[in-house]
Image (cartoon, grey):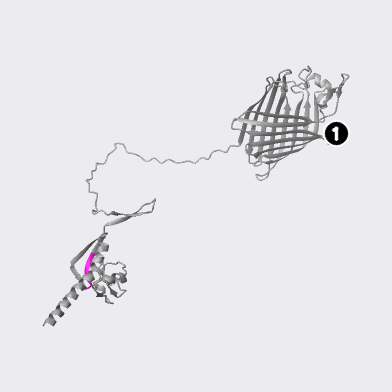
């Protein structure tokens, strides 16, 4: 009898333990069973097969754990791991073959700091709805006495007309000064100024190129003992018209006009009374036809005219009677027919340093063919800012018709041969482009 009672109590004890362990294994948590098995006092055997019809969505099942077959777990240890972070609710009314349904909801939400990448946990809100419904109000539609009509506007796209003209205008003034006060090495005070203007108009359209430029320069120098003298005097006008057969060619059939003279009288020495040059004495006029090679991107052009008329005018009686500038004594003009080659190249050789190279070569067919008249202007512009700039200009002229005059020891005037004329100028001043 006593033996039978012990067997009944043992079966009841095993049944109770079995139910308790089944409740605990319904959570999908990976646990090292070798560690937990050291403190267990319950054992459960998980079957190999499970009926598919016993599965219900939303419930954690013991059939999700199949390996190892033998699982040792303690319900108190499982609760201690989960309850600080989860709400665990057991529905004891729904009994299943392998345990009861367990509802697990998290208590905290993990937050990652963007700067430090550290993690922290904050409690989740208990309420889901935080916005209460409010009443909505409406108004009646508004009516208009006059109907609104939709007017269609036809958009016309108008392209801007291309600009065929290019305008270049500049006015500048250079100033140089030398002053001495008790200077041991000696010297004379002087101040000089140079006024210069330049206007250019360029018309370029498909096959046609028309370039016109007028420039003027006038400079004075005032020294302490010698007084006021002229340092620069020039008026220059150039106009070139060209026509090409297609838009791909850089060669133009061209005609060119060039004119050059001066403003006021020029003297060899400040104390001289007789002028060696005057307005329209001389004046040079070139008219020719030929071909021009133009590279717009490189700002380089070459004009070659095998037929160029060169006219030298001396509209002053005294200079005309002397036969100055190659005219016959008493005549006012001299005409020549020859070949003219003119090149112009503008280039920025360094940042804010520009170079302009303008070279004219002319030779007469009739009178001493092979003697080349040279007119070469090489200038550099050093830009300081939008207003101020420094400039260096070198002008070389060789004309076989211009003879040099010198007075000998006996006071007689001797006419020598042609020589190279050279003038250099260096200054700093202001420039205004518009």
Q: Quadrant of residue 316?
A: top right
Q: Which of these two is toward me, 390 or 421? A: 390
Residue at the image position 31 percent from the left and 74 percent from the top: 68
Tell me if residue 63 comes above or below residue 284 in the rendering.
Answer: below
Which is the main secondary structure of the residues drawn in magenta?
strand
Is residue 35 in sight in this rendering? yes
Answer whether residue 101 is magenta in the image: yes
Q: Position of residue 390 (x, y in %)?
A: 65, 31
Give residue 285's quadrant in the image: top right
Identify the secondary structure beneath mark 1. loop
Q: Position of residue 193 (x, y in %)?
A: 67, 24
Classify residue 183 by image quadrant: top right
On the rendered structure, is 104 left or right of 210?
Answer: left
Q: Could you tell me residue 100's position as x and y percent? A: 21, 69
Q: How many marks?
A: 1
Residue pushed farthest left? 1
State the residue lying farthest toward the right. Answer: 410
Where does residue 249 sit, x and y in percent of width and height?
A: 68, 45
Position of 330 with respect to 7 (left or right) is right
Q: Is residue 264 above or below residue 349?
A: above
Span of residues in magenta = 97-102
In the rendered view of the protein, which quadrant contains the C terminus? top right
Question: Is residue 265 covered in magenta?
Answer: no
Please state which of residues 373 and 211 is positioned toward the viewer in this rendering. Answer: 373
Say if residue 96 shows up in the picture: no
Q: Is residue 38 above or below residue 421?
A: below
Which residue in the protein does label 1 denote? Answer: 368
> Foreground residue, 37 or 188?
37
């Amino acid at each position: 009898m006593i033996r039978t009672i012990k067997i009944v109590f043992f079966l009841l004890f095993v049944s109770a333990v079995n139910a308790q362990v089944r409740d605990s294994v319904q959570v999908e948590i990976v646990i090292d069973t070798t560690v937990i098995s050291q403190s267990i006092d319950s054992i459960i055997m998980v079957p190999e097969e499970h009926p598919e019809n016993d599965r219900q969505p939303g419930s954690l099942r013991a059939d999700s754990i199949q390996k190892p077959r033998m699982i040792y777990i303690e319900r108190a240890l499982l609760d201690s791991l989960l309850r600080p972070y989860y709400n665990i609710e057991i529905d004891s009314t729904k009994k299943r073959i392998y345990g009861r349904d367990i509802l697990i909801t998290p208590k905290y939400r993990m937050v990652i700091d963007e700067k430090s990448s550290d993690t922290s946990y904050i409690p989740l809100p208990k309420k889901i709805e935080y916005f209460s419904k409010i009443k909505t109000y409406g108004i009646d539609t508004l009516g208009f006495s006059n109907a609104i009509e939709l007017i269609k506007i036809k958009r016309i796209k108008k392209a801007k007309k291309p600009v065929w003209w290019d305008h270049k205008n500049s006015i500048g003034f250079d100033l140089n000064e030398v002053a001495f006060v008790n200077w041991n090495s000696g010297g004379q005070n002087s101040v000089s100024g140079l006024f210069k203007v330049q206007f250019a108009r360029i018309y370029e359209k498909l096959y046609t190129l028309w370039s016109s430029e007028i420039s003027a320069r006038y400079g004075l120098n005032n020294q302490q003992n010698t007084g006021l003298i002229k340092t620069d005097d020039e008026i220059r006008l150039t106009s070139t018209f060209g026509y090409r057969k297609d838009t791909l060619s850089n060669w133009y059939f061209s005609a060119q006009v060039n004119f050059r003279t001066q403003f006021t009288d020029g003297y060899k020495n400040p104390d001289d009374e007789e002028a060696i040059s005057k307005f329209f004495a001389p004046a040079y006029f070139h008219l020719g036809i030929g071909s021009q090679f133009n590279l717009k991107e490189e700002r380089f052009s070459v004009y070659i005219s095998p037929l160029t008329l060169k006219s030298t005018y001396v509209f002053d009686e005294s200079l005309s009677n002397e036969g100055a500038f190659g005219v016959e004594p008493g005549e006012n003009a001299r005409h020549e027919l020859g070949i003219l080659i003119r090149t112009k190249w503008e280039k920025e050789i360094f940042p804010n340093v520009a170079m302009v190279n303008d070279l004219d070569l002319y030779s007469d067919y009739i009178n001493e063919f092979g003697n080349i008249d040279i007119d070469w202007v090489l200038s550099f512009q050093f830009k300081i800012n939008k207003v101020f700039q420094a400039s260096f200009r070198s002008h070389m002229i060789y004309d076989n018709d211009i003879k040099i005059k010198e007075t000998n020891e006996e006071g007689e005037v001797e006419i020598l041969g042609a020589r190279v004329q050279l003038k250099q100028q260096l200054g700093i001043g202001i420039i205004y482009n518009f």
